[in-house]
Image (cartoon, rainbow, N blue to C red):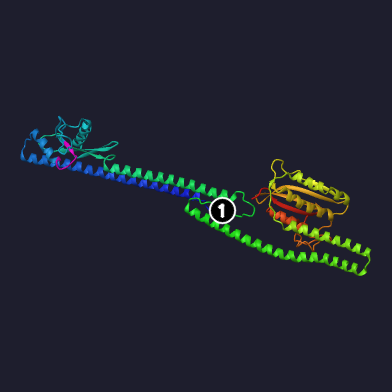
Amino acid sequence: MTAYSLRARLLALWVLLLASAAATAYLMFGFYSQSTAVQVAQAEVAVGRACREIIDRYAALTRRTRSIARAELGPTVGAALDLYPGIEGGVWSAADGPLAYAYPTYEGTGPKTDLPEAERDSIAAVNAQALRVDHAVAVRRPSRTQVLLVQGCPLHGPEAGLTAWTMGRAHVNDGPAYTRFLAGLGFLAVTVLGSAAFLGWFLYGFSGRIARVEAALAAPRPDGEDLPRLAPTGERELDRLVDALNAAGGRLREARARVVAAERLAAVGRLAASIAHEIRNPIAAMRLKAENALVSGDPGRATVALESMLGQIARVDHLLRDLLNLTQARTLTRTPTDIAALLADCARLHEDLASARGVRIAIEADALPGADRPQIDGAQIARALDNLLLNALQHTQPGGRVRLAAARVTVDGAVRLHLQVADTGPGIDPAVRPGLFEPFVTGRPDGTGLGLAIVREIALAHRGTVGLIDDAPETTFVLDLPWRPS
């Protein structure tokens, strides 16, 4: 199923709004065009009826008298046009031109008695055509704001060559209809532009708030904090998600604290049992030596017993020191650390032991970047490497090699630091592999089994891991640490 972003959805909504506005404008223009066409048709009908009214009144006048004085034509035309507001007209002679003119419904100051000179040629042409075809002729003269309608009608009577004419105007881009049309288009344009501006403002603000939430989630956080406490964004719907994330982070921290407490409790139980076992053995040996020395009464034997007891006490002291290192709280001091120098210091510290055992120490750190250094606690990592290196030296036969290596790798998009300690020894006993990093698990009779457990605690404090590579040709331990704290 395809997932579309909020930006794409809002853009689609804006396009739909624009298309709807265009369709509405088209329909409005169509309705306005139809209304103007109706206005022109109505005006044309009125002009035709007025022309026929002049014909009827002229015919009635001719029935009363055989000779019509030209002075009577004006009142006749005026009486006929008085019934049709906005219509002007008169009587035209093919020989003499205008014989009568009237505009009884003229809205100006005083009666209008002069033939409109601007339309004189159109009036003359339509009358000549009507006289020539001997029936009514109508013409349209459209302009930007109006349509001029002129109609000529032949007059049959005692005088030949006479025609009646009427003229009206249909205002197509003027008047109330045109004003309403422009107001509608203006309102439509304002709403579309306003909607587009509102959507753009909303999209910009919403995207900015989401970006701030993403930045807060991706920002480096103190160790142990899985989700940060997000600040309100000011957007009600988005703040619901922020509140849910804050609540989930709180529950996650509480759950982590409970898990850590349970793990600590279980570890304390295992540790207490292992400590009791490890301390009971030296105590039992010291007790046996002391009892035998007392029974024998031999001062030499007492001296040997005391020396043996001192050795057992040293063993218990070493055990307790490792236990303190394992259980003490680790507060990290992260600084940019030169890993190559750190490896060299660790190797230099164990040079004497390596020489005594006939083992060579090799360092591989040439591939690390020179300027960018990882953020780690150098002292803690040096301690972990010391434990791993000492363990490797004790398991490597003379003539063997221990390798210290460092590399910068990318895992799932995150930059990591890999520190390796490998040796050519016989490998790890399969019996101790499952609990290799648990306290008191060791493959050496003289070991306490706390060295690798301390390494694991240091790795966890850095939010990293330590592990044994199964398929490596050498016995290889890897510390996997974040290059930057998160």
Residue 469 % position (x, y): 76, 56
Instruction: Name the residue located 75 percent from the left edge and 66 percent from the top edge.
Output: 273
Residue 172 % position (x, y): 28, 40
Q: Is residue 450 visible?
A: no
Secondary structure category for the residue under label 1: loop
- Residue 204 part of the magenta segment: no
Residue corresponding to mark 1: 229
Where residue 130 sits, quadrant-wise, is: top left
Q: Is residue 260 visible?
A: yes
Q: Nearer the viewer, residue 125 or 401?
A: 401
Chain part drawn in magenta: 81-89
User: Which residue in the rendered view is the most extreme toward the bottom?
Assistant: 295
Q: Is residue 136 above or below residue 389?
A: above
Residue 81 % position (x, y): 15, 40
Q: Horizontal placement of 405 versus 54: left or right?
A: right
Residue 150 % position (x, y): 22, 37
Q: Quadrant of the N terminus?
A: bottom right
